[in-house]
Amino acid sequence: MSGLVFSEVLIVDSKELTVSYFESEQSVYINRVFNSTIICKGKQIRLLDSHNLCLYVDVSCGITLERSSNIKICALKSSENNYMKINDFSNPFKSTNYKIITNDDTLSLNNLSLSR
């Protein structure tokens, strides 16, 4: 899969955004983003004050949420994807702020087409 590759990525203060596939060599920071879809690969993904997002991700270290809600997370197909490793600092014991989308809705890293 080829896409734009960055050292780090910061997406801030955005609404109704659709971001096609990109890669971050380090972290992806998503702050104050609403009603958006983001497709990316990175070492870690950190969300702050973001709501109503669909994330299609390949992440090696996991995802961190803080003051974020209604986050849908789907895996990009890869061999070492830790998309299910989620730390929600707003509700560390039982979070309802995110939902994992399972195998039936995974996005292929090879062709970026939704498989249903």
Image: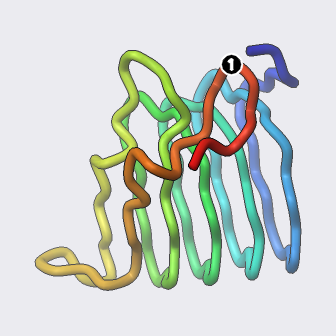
Amino acid type, label 1: Asn
Badge count: 1
Q: Residue at x 47, y 83 (%)?
A: 67
Instruction: Locate residue 113: give its quadrant.
Output: top right
Q: Nearer the viewer, residue 86 or 110?
A: 110
Q: Residue at x 74, y 81 (%)?
A: 34
Mark 1 = which residue?
Answer: 110
The image shows residue 61 at horizontal and vertical percentages of 37, 34
The image shows residue 110 at horizontal and vertical percentages of 68, 18
Q: Residue at x 44, y 74 (%)?
A: 66
Q: Quadrant of the N terminus?
A: top right
- Judge whether 73 appears above or below 75 on screen: below
The image shows residue 63 at horizontal and vertical percentages of 42, 51
Residue furthest left as drawn: 93
Instruction: Locate residue 21: give its quadrant.
Output: top right
Horizontal side, residue 98 vs residue 49: left or right: left
Q: Residue at x 60, y 40 (%)?
A: 107
Q: Secondary structure at mark 1?
A: loop
The image shows residue 52 at horizontal and vertical percentages of 63, 81
- Judge whether 2 appears above or below 35 on screen: above
